Amino acid sequence: MGRHGAVTFKGNPLTLAGEELKVGAAAPDFDLASYGSGGMQHIRKADLLGKPVFISVVPSLDTPVCQVQTKTFNQRLASLGDRIHALTVSLDLPFAMNRFCGAEQITAMKNGSDYMDRSFGTRWGVLIDELKILARAVFVLDAQGVVRYAQVVKEVAEEPNYDAAISEIEKLVKSA
């Protein structure tokens, strides 16, 4: 497993496992767990192709900054409706993610958990090696699964650049 770059958590440097995912690269495959009305389900990259994809990555929905990030993106992406696929990814258990999203009316975004094997975190270069949680990040993919925007937030306790990420997904929707 490769290692690249670093993020900080409250100023303490931490290492990211996996390779850095750059704009222009094909997005790696993933298999996330999700809990819904049909029970436990899978969300895979192949399920999302055909529309632009917005992926918000958070360390845990049980923390204030992750909650703000999820609520903000949900609100700002709602107007794009079914023209995009939007997803929140964390290592939280699918049941906990489902409970939070239900309580907070997170309806514009699906939620997927990488708890089974942390393969999303490793393949996408956002697994914090020392803590075994995901870094805060945002990715936007075009309908073919090519990365068009990537931000790994350098200080995990800070929020992402909402405007830049939303601008990129809106450009992809307009050009579709």
Image (cartoon, helix red, strand yellow):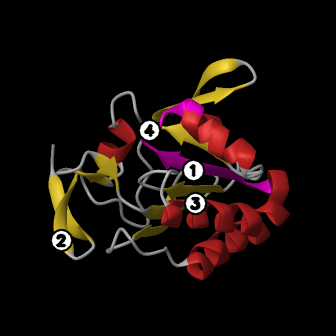
Q: What amino acid is labelled 1 in the image?
A: Thr
Alpha-carbon span between mark 4 and mark 3: 26 Å
Q: Earlier in the sequence, mark 1 or mark 4?
A: 4
In magenta, the rendered stretch is 83-95
Whether residue 148 appears in this view of the structure is no
Q: Position of residue 45 (x, y in %)?
A: 54, 39
Q: Check disc 4 and report its element: helix, strand or loop.
A: loop
Q: Nearer the viewer, mark 1 or mark 4?
A: 1
Q: Position of residue 121 (x, y in %)?
A: 35, 46
Alpha-carbon span between mark 2 and mark 1: 25 Å
User: Dot 1 corresponds to which residue?
Assistant: 88
Q: Is residue 171 above or below residue 64?
A: below
Tell whether position 36 is magenta. no
- Identify the residue at image location x=20%, y=67%: 6
User: Dot 3 corresponds to which residue?
Assistant: 67
Mark 1 near mark 4, Cβ–Cβ under 8 Å?
Answer: no
Q: Earlier in the sequence, mark 1 or mark 3?
A: 3
Q: Position of residue 56 (x, y in %)?
A: 54, 58
- Identify the residue at image location x=66%, y=52%: 86
Compare residues 166 and 99 and report the one nearer the observer.
Answer: 99
Q: Position of residue 165 (x, y in %)?
A: 58, 73
